[in-house]
């Protein structure tokens, strides 16, 4: 895609804002619409746009595939681990109220951490799926160009 | 403190180990972790059953939210019993898995196998333990999605199409179940199973409830591979890696049948299910057809794994037949067969795994003279086969005995005839193997020698369990009878 100058410039301008918006949806999700799923997809979309425009190899140079796979696992670990933390602090599994001294603060903290785990896993899964499909057709793409 | 949180730990430990397996990267580490966690889960399931026997129903509030608003894990005799079956098979099969997986899957995909296995176990245990209808759907999908991966790891390329076919069927089944849950949620405003049962009763035979019942029953029948919705099962079991065939054959369909039992008896109640919806004759006709047609096709298969897969279709017929009687004796027979069939098919598929490990094939010609080449493996197949036929002193005899008693008790002696015919057909497809293995000479240069002990010991533990529980029936029959009484008492 090296000859598509407009696409390259526009996406370079857009990608930081897409990623930033992803983070906004993630961390503002407790107060407004949003949350881990949506944020993960938006964040991954920014990354996938980069891979589409600048090529799969460049994208893989930024985040090697093994780190993304670890991200898939880490997100789930963060979610399930929060539950274990509340178990250890004397509550039921995933009872966020015990995580801080006051119940509302604990609930806030709990959902914040859990949603981060969801966001991490969703973003990583989206990218892994994209890599898996794009990696397959890569050779065909090059022939067409 | 830990005792109170056992219901959560039962699910959380396998769930946590799945991502850890990915992070561990190396196959040996992932195997060691899965092994420890599976045995822990088995220990927890024993403790849970003990707690239920001592103190009655356990209710665990997930996240501290009270039912019916929050998700409740609810353990009573029925699901404590099923949890025990699933966790026991999970632990035995993973012990066996090491060498078999290294040889059949290999190539850097082993950690992914262990991850999917743990997720599948999480899903199956989750479906069983939860008391929330939507939660059942979520766990059902976790177990199904991971089992599609597990099946597709098979060495034969046909494993991919088998897995894809299962994916289509499984998704249709799960969607039907979800539509049913949606309808019942609309009618009752609750997702908690116990609360739902109270609210469904006054609604009587409303259209919405009837439609919900129909959707849930059909969806779960697909998942349980009840004839004629079984067509995904034979190929899925035949082309999956041996470890996966053993694990799924012994657990996956059992869990779906458990959910069927739960919806028929606990949620809708025996009166609605069997008098208003006249489920009894439907289940009986389908299950007898499954028994006869499944056994008949099993006789003509050259691939032994396929033959036993079709035999599974027939055995599911026995379980559903017991439910169809809707009497304490019948349900006891059905529940017993859940346990007993897990033992026999687990043993048989693990023994076939040993055969594949040594010879790389499960066609009937690979078995020529096997009695001399792999005496212990072949003896295990014969042991499992005897149990499948229902020879006295094996578990197969016990469950068939109860089904016969139930048939005669309900005055349906002709059903007893079909049970006997199907057992005779089992003799044919098991005898075929014995004949080839012991009475025909080995071909020249055929591989010989036993599978490693890590594989033989779990196989033989299951084979011996077939005989132990065929003689000492206190635990299996005792718990199954109590569970059946509880189920039939709960609805009236």
Image: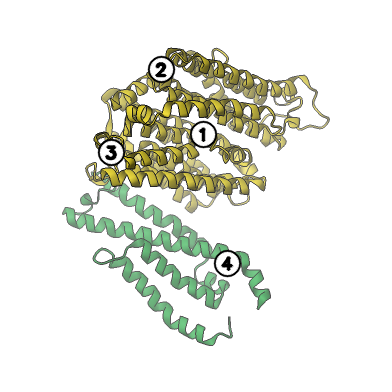
Chain colours: A green, B yellow
Q: Are marks 3 and 1 on the same chain?
A: yes
Whether B314 is drawn above or below B180: the answer is above
Chain ID for label 3? B
Residue B113 visible to the viewer = no
Rounded to the nearest angstrom, the CA distance separating label 3 from label 1 is 26 Å
Residue B143 visible to the viewer = yes
Label pair 1/2, CB-CB below 8 angstroms: no
Along the polypeptide, which appears first: circle 3 or circle 2? Answer: 3
Residue A71 percent location from the top left of the image: 44, 60
The answer to whether residue B84 is left or right of residue B423 is left
Q: What label sits on residue B196 in the rendered view?
A: 3
Residue B54 occupies quadrant: top left
Chain ID for label 1? B
Q: Which residue is mark 1?
A: B226
Residue at image point 25% right, 48% down = A95
Residue B460 percent location from the top left of the image: 57, 24
Q: A10 or B371, which is in the foreground?
A: A10
At numbered mark 4, what does the secondary structure look like: helix, strand or loop? Answer: helix
The answer to whether residue B47 is left or right of residue A31 is right
Residue B403 percent location from the top left of the image: 48, 18
């Amino acid at each position: 895609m090296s000859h598509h100058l407009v696409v390259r410039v526009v996406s370079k301008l857009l990608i930081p804002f897409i990623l930033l918006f992803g983070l906004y949806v993630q961390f503002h999700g407790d107060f407004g619409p949003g949350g881990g799923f949506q944020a993960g997809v938006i964040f991954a979309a920014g990354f996938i746009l980069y891979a589409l425009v600048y090529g799969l190899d460049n994208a893989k140079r930024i985040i090697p595939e093994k780190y993304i796979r670890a991200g898939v696992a880490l997100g789930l670990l963060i979610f399930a681990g929060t539950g274990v933390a509340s178990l250890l602090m004397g509550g039921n599994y995933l009872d966020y109220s015990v995580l801080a001294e006051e119940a509302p603060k604990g609930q806030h903290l709990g959902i914040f951490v859990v949603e981060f785990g969801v966001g991490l896993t969703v973003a990583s899964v989206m990218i892994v799926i994209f890599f898996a499909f794009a990696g397959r057709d890569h050779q065909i793409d090059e022939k067409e160009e | 403190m830990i005792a109170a949180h056992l219901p959560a730990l039962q699910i959380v430990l396998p769930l946590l180990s799945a991502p850890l397996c990915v992070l561990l990267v190396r196959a040996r580490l992932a195997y060691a972790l899965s092994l420890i966690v599976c045995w822990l889960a088995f220990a927890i399931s024993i403790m849970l059953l003990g707690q239920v026997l001592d103190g009655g129903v356990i209710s665990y509030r997930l996240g501290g939210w009270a039912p019916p608003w929050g998700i409740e894990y609810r353990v009573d005799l029925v699901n404590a019993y099923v949890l025990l079956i699933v966790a026991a098979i999970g632990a035995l099969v993973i012990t066996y898995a090491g060498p078999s997986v290294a040889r059949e899957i290999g190539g850097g995909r082993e950690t992914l196998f262990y991850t999917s296995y743990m997720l599948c176990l999480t899903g199956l245990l989750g479906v069983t333990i939860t008391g929330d209808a939507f939660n059942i759907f979520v766990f059902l999908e976790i177990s199904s999605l991971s089992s599609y991966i597990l099946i597709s790891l098979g060495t034969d390329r046909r494993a991919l199409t088998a897995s894809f076919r299962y994916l289509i069927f499984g998704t249709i089944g799960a969607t039907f179940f979800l539509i049913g849950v949606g309808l019942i949620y609309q009618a009752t405003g609750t997702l908690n199973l116990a609360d739902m049962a109270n609210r469904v009763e006054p609604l009587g035979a409303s259209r919405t409830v009837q439609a919900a019942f129909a959707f849930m029953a059909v969806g779960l029948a697909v998942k349980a591979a009840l004839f004629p919705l079984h067509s995904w099962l034979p190929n899925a079991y035949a082309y999956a890696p041996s470890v996966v065939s053993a694990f799924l054959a012994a657990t996956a369909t059992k869990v779906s049948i458990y959910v069927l039992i739960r919806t028929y008896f606990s949620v809708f109640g025996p009166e609605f299910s069997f008098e208003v919806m006249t489920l009894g004759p439907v289940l009986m006709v389908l299950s007898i057809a499954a028994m006869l047609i499944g056994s008949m096709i099993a006789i003509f298969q050259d691939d032994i794994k396929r033959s036993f897969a079709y035999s599974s279709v027939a055995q599911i017929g026995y379980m559903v037949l017991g439910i169809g009687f809707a009497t304490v004796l019948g349900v006891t027979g059905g529940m017993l067969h859940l346990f007993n069939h897990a033992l026999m098919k687990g043993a048989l598929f693990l023994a076939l795994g040993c055969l594949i490990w040594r010879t790389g094939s499960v066609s009937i010609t690979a078995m020529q003279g096997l009695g001399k080449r792999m005496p212990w493996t072949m003896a295990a197949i014969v042991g499992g086969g005897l149990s499948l036929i229902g020879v006295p002193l094996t578990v197969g005899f016990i469950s068939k005995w109860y089904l016969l008693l139930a048939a005669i008790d309900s005055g349906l002696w002709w059903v007893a005839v079909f049970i006997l015919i199907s057992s005779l057909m089992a003799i044919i497809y098991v005898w075929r193997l014995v004949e080839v293995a012991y009475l025909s000479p080995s071909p020249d240069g055929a591989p010989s020698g036993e599978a490693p002990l890590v594989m033989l010991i779990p196989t033989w533990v299951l084979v011996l369990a077939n005989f132990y529980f065929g003689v000492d029936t206190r635990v299996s029959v005792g718990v199954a009878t109590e569970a059946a009484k509880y189920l039939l008492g709960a609805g009236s």
